[in-house]
Image (cartoon, grey):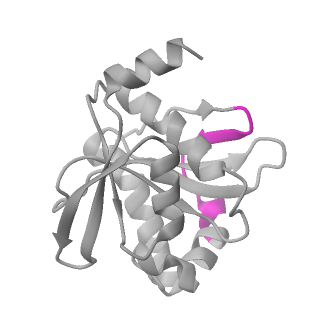
């Protein structure tokens, strides 16, 4: 099987296929307490499997999450994109900001590019983001993107999550024209 994972660019970021060289930063993030809302903390072995799942999602669904790097430095800063594993209530737009890159707007910038791809290329009419109730940073990203709280969802492993509904594709297209 050959995977084709497109590359997207924003003003400061490049969204590209995850690669083995991302593992050190990925593993560091998943070993930290910061990963508690997205399946961590995890061992290096578990983190490697999670990185492989990110790549495999592209093969199984035809879309997935990109590794995000600072275009100027090549540093791996985020993993962002579309996510819909078995057991999810519907396709999600998700992000995991790597350690040390908080407060720069990278998650929002990358997630907006991913949402545009989901709407314009994949034809999604809408998207959600699932946010752990105590994950204030992730909730702030969803709000900056115009998402609104919709309801709660009980996941078998992560417990109760908040469903944040993104603006519909039609509204996003109109807003993009007005910029």
Instruction: Tell me which residue sits at (54%, 13%) in the image.
Output: 178
Residue 122 at what x, y percent from top left? 32, 27
116 magenta-colored: no
Q: Quadrant of the C terminus?
A: top right
Extreme residue in the right direction: 72
- Residue 121 makes an appearance in the image: no
Residue 168 at what x, y percent from top left? 31, 30
**Tag count:** 0
Residue 12 at what x, y percent from top left? 74, 38
Residue 40 at what x, y percent from top left? 45, 81
Instruction: Tell me which residue sits at (46%, 72%) in the image.
Output: 135
Which region shows up in magenta?
A: 11-23
Closest to the observer: 89 or 75? Answer: 89
Question: Can you say whether 37 is above or below 129 in the image?
Answer: below
Left or right of 13? Residue 27 is left
Question: Can you say whether 53 is above or below 135 in the image?
Answer: above
Residue 25 appears in which quarter of the rendering?
bottom right
Closest to the observer: 84 or 11? Answer: 11
Q: Quadrant of the N terminus?
A: top left
Closest to the observer: 131 or 36? Answer: 131
Instruction: Tell me which residue sits at (36%, 71%) in the image.
Output: 132
Closest to the observer: 87 or 103? Answer: 103
């Amino acid at each position: 099987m050959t995977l084709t994972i497109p590359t997207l660019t924003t003003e400061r970021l490049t969204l590209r296929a995850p690669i083995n060289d991302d593992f050190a930063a990925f593993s560091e993030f998943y070993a930290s307490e910061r990963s508690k809302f997205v399946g961590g903390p995890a061992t290096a072995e578990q983190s490697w499997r999670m990185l492989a799942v990110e790549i495999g999602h592209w093969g199984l669904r035809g879309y997935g999450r990109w590794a995000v790097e600072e275009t100027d430095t090549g540093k791996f800063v985020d993993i962002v994109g579309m996510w819909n594993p078995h057991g999810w209530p519907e396709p999600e737009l998700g992000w995991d900001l790597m350690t040390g890159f908080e407060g720069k707007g990278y998650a929002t910038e990358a997630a907006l590019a991913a949402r545009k791809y989901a709407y314009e290329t994949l034809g999604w009419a809408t998207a959600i983001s699932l946010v752990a109730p105590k994950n204030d940073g992730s909730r702030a990203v969803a709000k900056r993107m115009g998402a609104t709280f919709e309801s709660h969802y009980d996941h078998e492993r992560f417990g109760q999550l908040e469903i944040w509904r993104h603006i519909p594709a039609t509204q996003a297209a109109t807003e993009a024209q007005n910029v």
